[in-house]
Every structure is written in structure tokens, then in C-alpha cells.
Amino acid sequence: MNYISRARELGGDIAAHRHYLHQHAELSYQEKETTAYLVEQLEKLGIPVKRFDDYTGCIAIIQGGKPGKTVMLRADIDALPIQENSGVEFESIHPGVMHACGHDCHAAMLLGAAQLLWESREELSGTVKLLFQAAEEVFVGSHYYWDKGHLSDVDAALGMHVWPDLPSGTLAVIDGPIMASCDNFTITVHGVSAHGSQPNNGRDAIVAASAIITNLQTIVSRVDDPLHSLVVSIGTIKAGTQFNIITDTAVMSGTVRTHSPEARALVEPAMRQIVQGTAQALGCTAEVEYNYLEPPVINADTALNTIARTAAAKVCGQENVRSCTPAMGSEDFSYLMEKIPSSLFAFLGCWDEEAGCVHPVHNEKFRINEEILPLGAAQYAQFAADYLEQSAGGEA
């Protein structure tokens, strides 16, 4: 099958899927209406679908006409707690919930790919699993499908994201890191309360917290290898009850991002040492709660990356296959990449100044030019077909 040609023929249907999903945006773990729609559309085509009584999302399974390996294509389906202001006619009907990260696009593209692969199933040398994944925005939504054994037979996998840092109609597949890890932490500082006119009678948790915030930056500037990418950021600080009271408690939370597994491993012990030492020096105590959420997204299988780039050239032309700068944002597809080493993640460009598509993801005005949707559908399908053909010993 000529996947890009057929995908363009299906462009109206893919856009209609996107409109429905966008209008009916649902938050993580709440994607019941979204899942029902996806299952309905897949079953209309005759594609077998696996649903879950205790979890949202679904897995469609397309068995090829010839034996071979199993490849998985993944799209996330959850939305964000954002009040939409994009100006599209099909804006979210749910107040305060918006597809501001393109997950509606991903799901619509994967529905398009499902039809492409179903129509060409007799040509496929193996099996395609299509994962419509819940709860990506809360960092751990992908775990369920692997941990419950639904993906244990997968040999290779592809995830994809619409990306406003790249021009519409381009595809980027790079070797090595492409997105960062995401770990979160909470620091609680305990001091001694006193009247603000007599600070010497207390131990100021705010002063200790301020010193901790400053000292934590030495993890990046003095502890980590300067050739690594590493961010240690405090996002919240809550302290104090009254303008004239030395407070006895300060609570901070933040995030750590890096492309380097080595840098990721050193942050927690360095943080604990700095936090406890700084607090003690100022007469306070402190505790750290540190949560490891998502590893970095690393396209480590260069042979698989080559298959994806070759597929991209067929879909959008060699001149539109791009490189890109790795992002410091995170993606919970990385959990599946750790479990399925032959995996990769790709970006589909969606920046289009003429169409007004100039806003970043997680923005109330985020929008795309829907002409890119057939490209994403075709890339999913072309990659799957090419991988199965080559892994079976054929020439894609």
C-alpha cells in the first residue's frame, strides 16, 4: 500500500476523529468517553480491541497475513486541566479541560493508521498492536499496560508527538536522547516559631528554605558534569501564617530533569546532603521526599531509528526529515522504552505561522494545522510495515 496516498484520502475522517476527541477532552484516568469512542471506531473497521474493566485506554490488534514479529504503535489520549482559548470551532465542551498537548491529534492519527494497516493486513509480516494510552500527563499512565502483561510480546515500539518547535510537515527522528527524565521532590523544613520582633528566640524555617533553594543550584553548577543537561527547579514554596511571626515550617516542591542516567542518579544523594546540612547550619531540620517518575527518552537503537527515518522520507520527503534539539520536557513512553529496548520516539512538526499555529504545548491557545494529521497516520503505518518486513528478512 502507498500509505501516504491513502492517508491523504482519509484526511477528512482523521480530522473528524480529532474534532470529536478534542471536543470531548477528558483528564487522566477519566477517559471513559474517549475510550468508548476509540473502541467504537476500531470495531466498526472490524479490528479486534482489548478493553480493561479497571483502566481506561485500549489496545487494538492487527494480525498480518504473514508470520513475523510484533510491533507496537502508541498514542496518548488524556487532556489537561486548562480552560481552552484556542479559537477553534470544535473547542472542548468540558469547562477547564483541554487537549492542549496534542493527544487528540495522536489518537486520531493512530485511528487513521489502524485503518491503513487493517486494509493492508495481508501484506504485513507479523502483528501490530496499537496502544491508545491513558494518563500520560500524570507521568505513570503507561505502566499499567506493561505491568499487566498486555505488551510482553512486543519486539519494537514507536511513540510520536506533535511538536511546535519544528515546522509543520516535518518529521524528526534523532539518535540518542530526545526528551528528559522527570523526577519530583518535596522538601519540608522544620524550625522554631517566634515573634517577628524577636527572631533570636526562634529558628526561621523561611530563612533556611531560602538558603536551601540557593544551595541546591550547586548540584547543577558544581556536582554534575557540566557536559550533562540537568535542571533542578523549585516550583512551589509554602510558609508562614502571619506577617509578624517567625514561621516554624516551610514546604517546597520541585522537579529534576536530565537526559543523562548518570546525572539522574547523583541528584537525590546530593540533594539530601545539601538540604540536611544547610538546615542544620541554621538550627533547623529538614526532610526530603524524592519520587522517580519518568526516565529520559533515549532513541538508543540506531538501526530502528534508521527504519523510522526511511519511513519518514517516504511519507513527507527526504527534505522534510529533520534533526532537532533534544527537549527538556518529559514523556512517560520512556517507561515502555526501558521495557522494550527496540523503541523510539519521533516528533511531528506543527509550527505554522500562516495558520496561526505558533503556541507551545500546554498553552490555552495551542492549535495545529490539520494537514499534518495524514502525515502522522502514514508515519505510524509505514514504520510498522517496514519494521515487520525487514525483521522478517525482506526489503521494505
Image: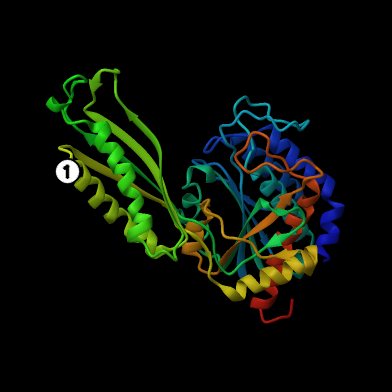
Q: Furthest-front residue in view? A: 197
Residue at position x 14%, y 27% in the image: 200
Q: Secondary structure at mark 1?
A: helix
Q: Position of residue 365 (x, y in %)?
A: 68, 35
Q: Toward which corner of the image does residue 104 lie, by quadrant? A: top right
Amino acid type indicated by mark 1 = Ala
Q: Which quarter shows the C terminus?
A: bottom right
Q: Is residue 87 above or below residue 329?
A: above
Q: Nearer the viewer, residue 158 or 260?
A: 260
Q: Nearer the viewer, residue 162 or 208?
A: 208
Q: Position of residue 103 (x, y in %)?
A: 64, 44
Q: Position of residue 130 (x, y in %)?
A: 63, 55
Which residue carries the number 1 mark? Answer: 281
Q: Furthest-left residue in view? A: 201
Q: Is residue 150 left or right of residue 325?
A: left
Residue at position x 67%, y 32% in the image: 24
Q: Toward which corner of the image does residue 250 lie, by quadrant? A: top left
Residue at position x 56%, y 32% in the image: 81
Residue at position x 73%, y 41% in the image: 18
Q: Is residue 8 above or below residue 77?
A: below
Q: Is residue 23 left or right of residue 289?
A: right
> Label 1: how many residues lie within 10 Å, few (<14), some (14-19) or many (20+)?
few
Q: Position of residue 64 (x, y in %)?
A: 70, 66
Q: Is residue 131 above or below residue 309?
A: above
Q: Is residue 302 left or right of residue 266?
A: right
Q: Is residue 354 left or right of residue 113?
A: right
- Regarding residue 294, the answer to whether it shows in the image is no
